[in-house]
Amino acid sequence: QLFWEKRLQGLSASDVSEQIIKSMELPKGLQGVGPGASTESLLSAVASALHTSQAPITGQSSAAAEKNPGIWLNTAQPLCRAFLVTDDDIRKQEERVQQVRKKLEEALLADVLSR
């Protein structure tokens, strides 16, 4: 189905206590295209593309996809505008990963010490 992400709109993941899990925040450079494009459907499309394809994710390269995505759609790419990941983006993400790893290390150490 061409716009399969639309079927998932309005659905949210929840934990075992049925609390809704907060959705991820996507970078500002990722903007959806197509009918009723939303952050949630874009997140589903990007996650699916990363999971099912080994090709790089670049978004829709045709500007005409904005006007009529049903005709000018590259089905191998998620429904988002074309984007570019810069070296600065990668550096910032590496810093975030290091910060989270440090927090995890501290939490694990605190857990070991409390026992």
Image: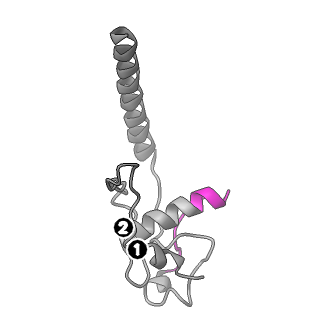
Disc 1 residue type?
Gln
Provide residue 56's location: percent of width, then percent of height. Answer: 61, 58
Q: CA distance from mark 2 to mark 1?
A: 10 Å
Residue at coordinates 40% horizontally, 44% vertically from top-left? 88
Does the magenta segment cover residue 70? no
Point out the image quarter for the N terminus. Answer: bottom right
Earlier in the chain: of badge 2 and badge 1, it is: 1
Q: Answer few, some or many: residues within 10 Å of disc 2's Cα (few below 14, many 20 plus, some between 14 and 19).
A: some
In the image, residue 39 sits, relative to residue 100, either above or below, namely below
Residue 21 lies, with reference to residue 6, above or below; the image says above
Q: Where does the magenta region start and end? A: 49-62
Above-or-below relation of 58 to 35:
above
The picture places residue 26, in percent across and down from the top left corner, at 37, 57
Residue 35 sits in which quadrant?
bottom left
Q: Position of residue 36 (x, y in %)?
A: 37, 82
**Up-down relation of residue 4 to residue 99 (above or below):** below
Relative placement, left or right, of 85 versus 102 is right
Where does label 1 land, which residue? 9
In the rendered image, residue 51 lying in the magenta stretch gets the answer: yes
